Amino acid sequence: MPSHDRHPLNSSINLSFVGDSVISPKPILCYLGFYFDYKLNFHYYTYFYATKCLSTLNAMKMLENSLHRLLPIQKCLLYRTYILLITLYGFQLWFFKSAPFFKNISELKRIQWRAALWITGAFQTSLSEGIEAIAGLIPITIYLCKLNSRHYL
């Protein structure tokens, strides 16, 4: 029997001696705002917070349209102080040296690209690295490495 068949994902516990109930495992467990799946790859976790940040970014766009126009410096400050903190909540769980979580980092790059477009007012066909540089944003992988090194200190 292969090792991956010993603990199947949908195995349930029969508690018939307690009262005819069957306990089935959930595919995703939420604990203190962290979402764990059975493989611990944190794809759902980064997807959840990426969606939350994109909706927050869209709300900030609507806020800008309803009030006076925000300056790019103010937009950048809003992104750094609010959206980036939501995005990187608990990144220490999945971002560490030699962790192959490229899908998670691509979600974060997508958020930063959308924020850079909002800050600069550029077109969607613009290159992400150039727009991030014009907006004054650090590339997300370098920012994660910086935060990770500070975390260890």
Image: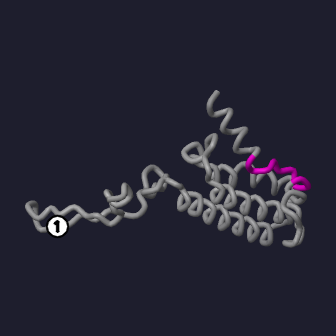
Q: Which residues are magenta?
A: 133-141
User: Would residue 7 appear left or right of 21 to someone viewing this image?
Assistant: right
Query: At x 22% / y 61%, what residue is drawn?
Result: 13
Residue 73 at x, y percent in the picture: 86, 53
Label 1 crowding class (10 Å Cα cut-off): few <14, some 14-19, many 20+? few
Q: How is the image coloured?
A: one colour
136 lies left or right of 40: right
- Nearer to us in this view, 54 or 107: 107
- Residue 60 lies in what quarter of the image? bottom right
Q: Residue furthest front?
A: 1
Percent across and percent down for residue 34 are 49, 52
Q: Is residue 139 magenta?
A: yes
Mark 1 belongs to which amino acid? Ser
Image-quadrant location for residue 150: top right
Residue at 64% x, 40% y is 97
Residue at numbered disc 1: 21
Query: In which quadrant of the rendered image does the N terminus lie?
Result: bottom left
In-front residue for pair 34/67: 34
Residue 2's x, y, as percent?
Answer: 36, 58
Tell me what residue is drawn at x 46 percent, y 56 percent.
39
